[in-house]
Amino acid sequence: MCHNNDFSLSEAIDKFILMFAGMLNVSRDNIILAGGSKGGTAVLYYAFKFGYKHAISIVPQFSKLADFLLSNLKVWHMTYQNMFGSENITKQQIYSIIESAITESPYINYVNLYLLRSDNDKVDTCIELVNLLKSFKDAHCNELVINSPLAYQHDKVSAYSLSLIKGLISVISYGFTPYISKTTMTQTDLPPVLIMQST
């Protein structure tokens, strides 16, 4: 998103994505952003900041990103330093980067967000994110709660949800925009599978 608190990097990444998509004759409307954990956070940022229509964010670190980085600064100090330019940035300043990308977005009613989260996630359950998006009546937030015992922690949700993620990407790539009300998946034996029927 930024380097040394300089956000021109995010603009360069947006240009790179569009340049690569242009070489493939793919318009911004047909790009699907997908990522998990900090990659899920980046999906939120880029989708709402730059107006990507389709965004699949898996267990993003939304309200707990600063806590996660600060919990073990010895391991994450270079990430922290590269992103923010200093270790003297507050938790609130970090949170406001992602929050303002959403709250100040002119694309709030354009982005179709598929949020895969888990109540089992000790890193971030994303409740704050869901509540923030619900405060915008025009936001398109499709909330999929993965509460299977097989997805019992942060780094297990993406792998468990792979067939669902692939199904979403497939349906979207065929030109459909699925709207899913809040869905909670708790099955224990098989990963979730997205089944679409046309009438």
Image (cartoon, rainbow, N blue to C red):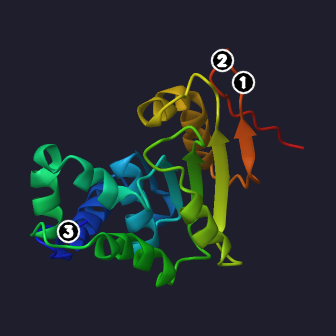
Residue type, numbered disc 3: Cys
In the picture of the structure, the residue carrying the numbered disc 2 is: 190
Image marks 1 and 2: residues in contact by CB distance under 8 Å: yes
N-term-proximal mark, 3 vs 2: 3
Q: Where residue 40 appears, x then y in whole percent?
A: 41, 51
> Residue farthest to the top?
189
What's the distance in space between the residues labelled 3 and 2, CA to CA? 39 Å
129 left or right, relative to 178: left
Q: Where residue 73 appears, x then y in whole percent?
A: 16, 51
60 left or right, relative to 23: right
Q: Where residue 187 appears, x then y in whole percent?
A: 72, 24
Residue 173 position (above or below residue 149): below
| Quadrant location, the C terminus | top right
In the picture of the structure, the residue carrying the numbered disc 1 is: 187
Foreground of the two, 23 or 121: 121
- Label of residue 97 in the image: none
Residue 164 position (above or below residue 59): above
The label nearer to you, 1 versus 2, is 1
Give the secondary structure at mark 2: loop
| Quadrant location, the N terminus | bottom left
In the picture of the structure, the residue carrying the numbered disc 3 is: 2
